[in-house]
Image (spheres, rainbow, N blue to C red):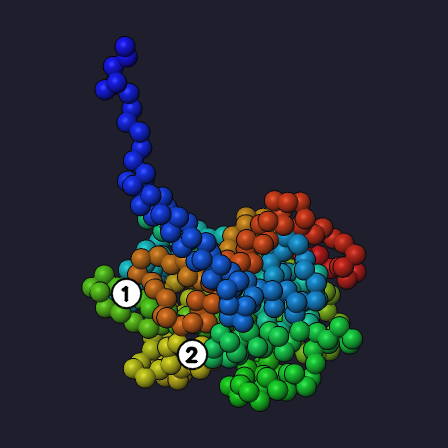
Amino acid sequence: MPDLESRPASPNPRRAWPALLGITLIVAAAALAFAWVAGWLTPSRLTPQRFTNAIETSNGHIYRGFRRAHAKGVCVAGYFEGNGQGVTLSSARIFAPVRTPFVGRLSVGGGSPYGLDSKARVRSMALELNSDDGQQWRMAMNSFPFFGVASVQAFYEQTVANTPDPATGQPDPVKQAAFAKAHPEFARFAAWAKSAPWPTSWANTTYNGVNTFRFINRAGEQHDVRWSMQPQTAFAAMSSEQREAADGNFLSEDLDVRLAQGPMRWDMVVTVAKPGDPIVDPSQSWPEDRRHVIVGTVVIESTTPQTTGACRDINYDPLVLPTGVEGSGDPVLAARSAVYSVSFNRREHDIASGKAASATGPAAPQGAKP
């Protein structure tokens, strides 16, 4: 007769059901959290997915495999050379007198990789710096000196207002006027876009971080800051006649010519806030008399096409930060980070699934290239 005591004991259902219930609750909670983030439970809530959908709609066309915003650009590479002046503000390694390599990107505003450079009011610089202490800092900067609106909701409404009407191919001026009336702070940005001179090159354009960040030094002291990359290349403005006659890719062509002659440089200028300065409203500038510290130099040495270059698969999320740098709590900054992530995932899915648009295709104007 077999030894009954050697047989495995039968599960006790009274003991098993609490564990099963716990697992069920965990799975249900995860599903609910996913549904909440995706916006399925609250269709009217503004989510990163919904915001990215609006950007795609405003572009009028989805260019698979390209960024949903600032789709046209080139990869660049070089280094940041700290001068030691930034160590009093932040413990980030790049501010020491060392060279930190980066993979970057220069681009223009708009959702088409085939857009004309002469029509793009906004230019951008993005950097991924990899310091010798194993930390990474990603920056995403633009040529405008301040953000157009003060809130994430207003940013979304601006995107919707600029969506082309299918009947005309142009934004509805009535909707644009209604948006401007509802958000009077946008008037300052509109004035900048209308009156500020257009630089002749990526090389002589100033790029601004726009949002506020917090620097922390080794003593634990905190400083609210904004920064700009100010060109060492002399500024020159384009006339409207020059823009009209310019080649559709004049920025990348100019970049190639300049780099054949040597590297291009920008000084990183950090502006330190005083008490009372707006920290979480990127549409408000700080007074000109604030303290400015030149903390180092960005040096671009080479460029490659974005379709094959190292920058293609980088999400330039502005909240990827090293020790010594933190976000400020600005909701617009957090929204940028979230939307960049959704856009990146969609772009990578396009590439992985073979749905990426051709680098040259019927949607490209004659002579244009991404």
Quarter occupied by residue 214: bottom left
Q: Nearer the viewer, residue 328 or 210?
A: 328
Given the current orientation, which residue lies at the most extreme front position?
1
Where 252 sits versus 195, above or below?
above
Quarter occupied by residue 20: top left
Give the residue drawn at x 61%, y 87%: 178
- In the picture, measured across the screen, residue 313 lies left or right of residue 216, that is right
**In which quadrant is the N terminus drawn?**
top left
Given the current orientation, which residue lies at the most extreme top position?
1
Crowding at mark 2 (Cα within 10 Å: few <14, some 14-19, many 20+): many
Give the residue drawn at x 57%, y 77%: 157
Where 359 sits versus 172, above or below?
above
| Element type where label 1 sits in the image | strand
Mark 2 lies on residue: 281
- Tell me residue 114's x, y (percent): 70, 61
Mark 1 lies on residue: 216
Q: Is residue 179 visible?
A: yes
Number of numbered callouts drawn: 2
| Element type where label 2 sits in the image | loop
Q: Which mark is residue 277?
A: none
Label 1 and label 2: CA atoms lie apart by 21 Å
Q: Amino acid at mark 1?
A: Ile
Where 9 sits versus 114, above or below?
above
- Tell me residue 92's x, y (percent): 32, 58
